[in-house]
Amino acid sequence: MSALLVIIILGVLATLILESMPSIKSLGIGFLWGKIWDPVQNIYGAYPFLVGTLLTSFIALIISVPFSYAIAIYLGEYNPKGWLSDLLKNTIELIAAVPSIIYGFWGLFVLVPIIRTFEMKIGVAPYGIGVFTSSLILAVMIIPYAASLGITLIRMVPSPLKEGAYALGATRYEVIKSVIMPYTRSGLFAGILLSLGRALGETMAVTMLIGNTSAVADSLKNAIFGPGNTMASVIANEFTEADHTEYLSALIELGLVLFFVTVVINLIGKRIITRFTNN
Amino acid sequence: MEAKIGFRNVKSVIFKSIVVFFAFLITVPLIVVLVYIIKQGVTQVNWHFLTNVPAPVGETGGGILNALWGSFIMVMAAAVVAIPIGMMAGIYLSENSRTKLAYYSGLCVDILQGVPSIVVGIVVYFWVVKPLGTFSAISGSLALAIMMLPIVIRSTEQTLRLLPDSLKEAALSLGVPYHRVILKVIVPCGFAGILSGITLSIARVIGETAPLLFTAFGNPYLSSSLTKPMESLPHLIFTYATSPYDDWHNLAWGASFILLMFVLILNIVTKLLTRRWKIQL
């Protein structure tokens, strides 16, 4: 049965490669930086979606990092036991449990109007939906992954190290800064990688909030606050509409790229964690 | 020196307040989302809502029976496929952690855990939907089963690793054959842990929409046929939430409420089960 897993993974890979062959053959490597995605004219370029995916994921990551670090430090070091700590930990696990479709639905009806007024205030086109909105929701969704790993890692810091620093007269902040952080740095980084992997592949919430435009924005400001598209959202939206082979296989090639990127990121993250926990 | 230690202490206190602030700030979005969904959804839910299929636009009433039934059937079918396979693979991984096959399949579990759900949807589309020529519940179940596998495997493996070797050795020394040791000693002892993995995996896939978009597809009518398209709760929410009609939005809020309740209950059950076992999933 264990061998079945290897077969499934190989099967997934084979299917993706095989089905995206028509587009790989006709478009070549230029597919990745082609700026125009126009199925009607039969022109396919993945650049808008690559940019969209990277932009949403990285904004989400930047927003989420302070939160995940704060949770990891608070529950790992300041308050590792007790009812308050349990309550907070369960709450964070609950954030990961809520289905992404519910975040998307809520975002569409509650967050979008808020963002729209905010966008009017700062003077950009008030779409409401767009890259920034998706990133906000995405940030909330990925925090638990980095946070819960961080808690475990910070609790693993050997107490002789911390006690040594306290004995030398260090304050709590100094212990965290110069003992705990350096000790857990690689592990916390791995946690961030895992949540990045999560963000890249997230589909439903992003599909509902990003606005689904395949054009490349003319400025960074428009790229962040305007509507966009990610690899996952374009697949979700256009897969059932793809009416000819090349269109379909271009979408599958996007899936293949997504598969590779997330797999590599996840494996690197997992490798770092294994090395960390074995030492 | 006095002033300096004072400054350092202040810095420490400030840092702590920042950490506490951020750590608790994250509960705000969750509470806001939960309260909003419950407020919007709870008024929609009544007996009529649970026992009827959606009404066409313009007609009042209608419910989500087709989605409830579809989600139930597809998740059950997925569980029937994924649980035995996952448990067997988990047992294998915990019993033979040093073989080459165990290394590669462990790697594959890691990969599978990270595969975006939409990619699973694409692949199952080519495995089942295209050969059969139609969207079908069975393809949706297969996609969900693939998503369930890594969670069931990992929880089984980790629970069984926690069992003391003496348990197995005692049974073997009494002359019990190996396969009976596994079935009668190891699995029953780790049952609560395995069960928690199962409930967690069900909680995870019951809200999955992306793999169902190209597989089960959705169906506005009540259907029990595994070879026909079938509606599911998350897919119904997606279709109705993105529609322009207020009636349909209300239906989707009600469905979100039900889905949320399922997920919360399953997570609490998992929590209660893992409390006994102290396993990390």
Image (cartoon, rainbow, N blue to C red):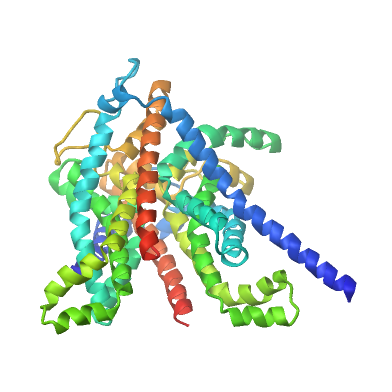
Q: Quadrant of residue A70?
A: bottom right
Q: Is residue A51 visible?
A: no
Q: Quadrant of residue B60?
A: top left
Left or right: where does residue A206 sit relative to residue A39?
Answer: right
Left or right: where does residue B215 sit relative to residue A39?
Answer: left
Q: How many marks?
A: 0
Q: Residue furthest top?
A: B59
Q: Give the x, y percent position of residue B120.
A: 29, 54
Residue at image position (50%, 34%) is B36
- As drawn, A70 above or below B163: above
Who is closer to the viewer here, A150 or A104?
A: A150
Q: Give the x, y percent position of residue A8.
A: 23, 63
Who is closer to the viewer here, A259 or B251?
A: B251
Left or right: where does residue A152 sit relative to residue A73?
Answer: left
Q: Give the x, y percent position of residue B272.
A: 37, 54
Residue at image position (22%, 57%) is B82
Left or right: where does residue A99 sit relative to residue B217?
Answer: right
Residue at image position (15%, 43%) is B133
Q: Is residue B252 visible?
A: yes
Q: Give the x, y percent position of residue B90.
A: 25, 68
Residue at image position (18%, 67%) is A1
- As drawn, B145 above or below B156: above
- As drawn, A253 above or below B56: below
